[in-house]
Amino acid sequence: MSAEEPVNQAGTEDSSAPAPASNDTREDWEVQRDKLKATADDHFRLKAYTLATQSYKAALELDPTNHILLSNKSAAHLANGEKSKALHDARKCVEHAPDDWVKGHTRLAAAMASLGRYSEALKVHTKVLNDIDPNNQVAIKGRDDCRAKERQAMEEKKREAIKMQMELDRQKAEKEQAQNAEPMPSAREDSNSTNGKSDGDDCTKRIKLQLNDLGTSTSQINRLLQTNYEWKNLNPFYVLDIPHTIEDESIISARYRALSLLVHPDKCPDDPVRAKKAFEQVRKAMTQMNDDDKRRHVKALLDEGHKQGRRDWEEELSKRGGVGVSSASDSEGLAQAQSKATMKIFAEIEQRRREVDRRKRKFEQRERAQEDEEKAKEKSERDHDKKWREGERVDKRVGNWRDFQVGGKKKK
């Protein structure tokens, strides 16, 4: 089977198995491979994508590095909505295909774009146009589409940030209005408030506002120690119960102090054990927030989780025949999908970290066991040598050898 073959209307590389001929030099496994591919191509044309992937898989068992089979299998997975599998096969296709085979690169870019990885897909399309074929129309269109999608994503992110800031401003204005409606302080209280304590009072007011928003100690302890809390609390913004778009350090610090006051063991004498666990979760989250690099990393993960959640929710809506987020229930469903996608991202990273730690510990244990074994062996040899010498076996053996030598000479 040649590397370059015509593309059919289904988007796969067309290589229907030719009828056997007297000059057919293919081996039996090649004939079987081509028959399986032809069957897979037919399934693809009929949009039976699951059957197509199965036939392509069977053909790849005979020829695992065939880039055309990998390319077609990636296309079938993508058409069937199996985006991650499409990306996996596309990567393998590029790995085994000739460097100038454009189809493999465009397959890879299409799979990346389907997963929302527009910047990565843009790089692949740009590589095709710069290094392989500057006039390739598929790459040109893909490049332009990715640029448009990136702009759209950035604009959506800005809109979400503006919306969140407006909501925070609204809440702040309502609380200030409620405070202004309280009775005026007495002259003594007013004079005390101007005694050089404006900064401390402002911080205290912030904390009081945060406390009003956070609710009771019991509700916060229950939230922080709910089922699977060790996974949910990987997100420090969730622990502090604030939007990840907030940049104001003073708000984050006030939130931490207010939440710490609520769940501190000294403030919760009725449930000090659970309060201590909750307090540790809050302190751990703030440690992450105080590290600028870690906070930026967390924000990036949350942005990706929100994007993936929106894609998942829109896909669910399309299956149900809905279009866009148009009601309160839809908004709630979107929020749940984003929360689920975000927690999945954090959980996967934590699982990988734990696996690395497990392997590291196992390696260190093996090294320690080897060291202990070597030390035990050395000690055993030293003990054996010491006992041998203490038992005067050295003198006896040397004496016997001397007697033997003397006796031998007498015989001669």
Image: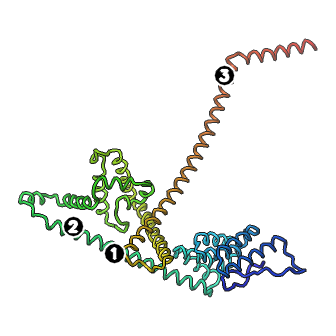
Task: State how many labels appear.
Answer: 3
- Mark 1 nearby-residue class (10 Å; few <14, some 14–19, many ≥20): few
Q: Residue at x 78, y 76 (%)?
A: 35
Q: Amino acid at mark 2?
A: Lys
Residue 295 as seen in the image, left or right of residue 91: left
**What number is the disc on residue 371?**
none
The answer to whether the residues at label 2 and label 3 have Cβ atoms under 8 Å apart is no
Please state the horizontal and vertical placement of residue 197, each as a whole percent of the image: 16, 58
The dot on residue 386 is 3
Q: Is residue 33 left or right of residue 112?
A: right
- Mark identifier at residue 175: 2
Foreground pick, 72 / 291 = 72
Name, please, the residue furthest toward the front.
Answer: 320
Q: Quadrant of the N terminus?
A: bottom right
Q: Of label 2 and label 3, which has the lower sequence position?
A: 2
Residue occupying image coordinates x 33% and y 72%: 164
Colour logic: rainbow
Mark 2, secondary structure of its residue: helix
Residue that carries the numbered disc 1 in the rendered image = 163
In this rendering, which labeled residue sits more in front, label 2 or label 3?
A: 2
